[in-house]
Image: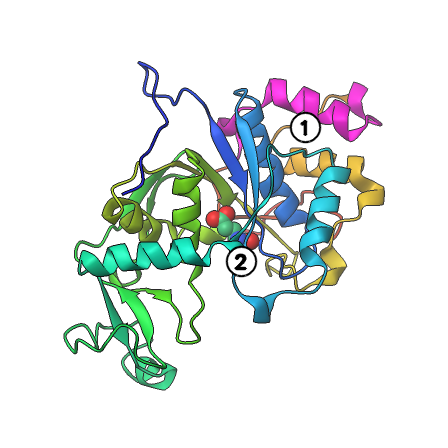
Amino acid sequence: MTEHLVTHQANGEPLMWRGRFAPSPSGRLHFGSLVAALASYLEARSRNGEWLLRIEDLDPPREQPGAADDILTTLEHFHLHWDGSVLYQSQRHQRYEEVLQQLAAQQQIYACDCTRKRIKEAGGLYPGLCRSRHLALDSANTSIRLKIDKPMTSFKDRIQGEVSVSAPIAAEDFIIRRKDGLFAYQLAVVVDDIDSQINHVVRGADLLDSTPRQLQLYHLLDANQPDYFHVPLASNVDGSKFSKQNFATAIDPEQASSQLTNALIFLNHPPPTELHNASCEQLLTWAQTNWNHQNVTASYSQTVDSSGKRLPNKQ
Ligand code: GLU
């Protein structure tokens, strides 16, 4: 069991506020990732907390050479400086394996050899077909799934309020190790956040559906769950989400202060006119003092133009 050392104040707030930014190196940072990085930075720094950086390089086939270093350089360019050394998930396999063994001992996992086709035929979400087959956990070409006994269909988010997720998604026995032997994001993110004693998670709203799954793992690993803050996703005028695969929207360090301003406007913290041509450092100092997550709009996405300028959302 992982010992959770963070202690709390009388009002329930943690003594030390520790957050993180956890990008996957599948491409360069884009405006949406800048928003997530900035919000998590400000949430931690405005409370004199720590802000850690973790590179989620868990899935080599999806990585782009050079992307991890590029992300670090870009963050530094924006003056988003992190504490301590960067944690790389690629160096944590042994720890994930240990946790997998712990869950095996708790009889919370099982092996599954179902093909995608089979799951599709069964309706798309996995209906527990291998739950009682007792396949060996180390048999070849099988994934490992977590047994969900009590689905969690809602949780409290500090920005989005009470969030409900679809019951079938919440009830699915999801994969924690893939057939190709790679550990799944859901497992790694929770193990790392527990081990790093992260007590608040600020990230994009595309991960709302993953949160109840991650909460299941916190529960099974007997760890304190973090507070969640899901910020709206930046979406293009055509409704598509900004993504690392779309190079047109990669942020440009040459335009750092105007993009940082756009990111602050996106988060409903427009800097005052005196800061019109301010440096990133000055903008961040102002934002740290003025940050209040309650000003961030509780919505799934927000439309922006290609430079990140906020546009009215389509009704
Ligand atoms: N690595 C994930 C991403 O880049 C974020 C994970 C998280 O913040 O929990 O989308």
Identify residue type, mark 2.
Ser
Query: Does the magenta portion include 89?
Result: no
Residue 181 placement (x, y as % from top left): 42, 72
Please name which of the two marks, 1 or 2, marks the residue nearer to the observer.
Answer: 2
Quadrant containing the N terminus in the rendered view: top left
Task: Say which residue appears at 54% left-offset and 54% top-offset.
Answer: 56
Residue 74 placement (x, y as % from top left): 74, 45
Pick the front one: 288 or 20: 20
Pick the front one: 152 or 62: 62
Q: Main secondary structure of the magenta part?
A: helix
Q: How many marks?
A: 2
Residue 219 placement (x, y as % from top left): 25, 45
Above or below for 263 versus 9: below
The reply, left or right, for residue 162 in relation to residue 286 is left
Residue 97 placement (x, y as % from top left): 37, 59
- Which stretch is magenta? 274-296
The residue carrying pointer 2 sits among few (fewer than 14), some (14 to 19) or many (20 or more) residues within 10 Å by Cα, namely some
Residue 158 location, quadrant: top left
The reply, left or right, for residue 247 in relation to residue 22 is right
Residue 121 location, quadrant: bottom left
Q: Which residue is mark 1?
A: 270
The reply, left or right, for residue 230 in relation to residue 151 is right
Above or below for 284 versus 226: above
Residue 231 visible in the snapshot: no
Q: Secondary structure at mark 1?
A: loop
For disc 1, does the CB lie below 8 Å from ligand 1?
A: no
For disc 2, does the CB lie below 8 Å from ligand 1?
A: no
Task: Say which residue appears at 53% left-offset and 45% top-offset.
Answer: 232
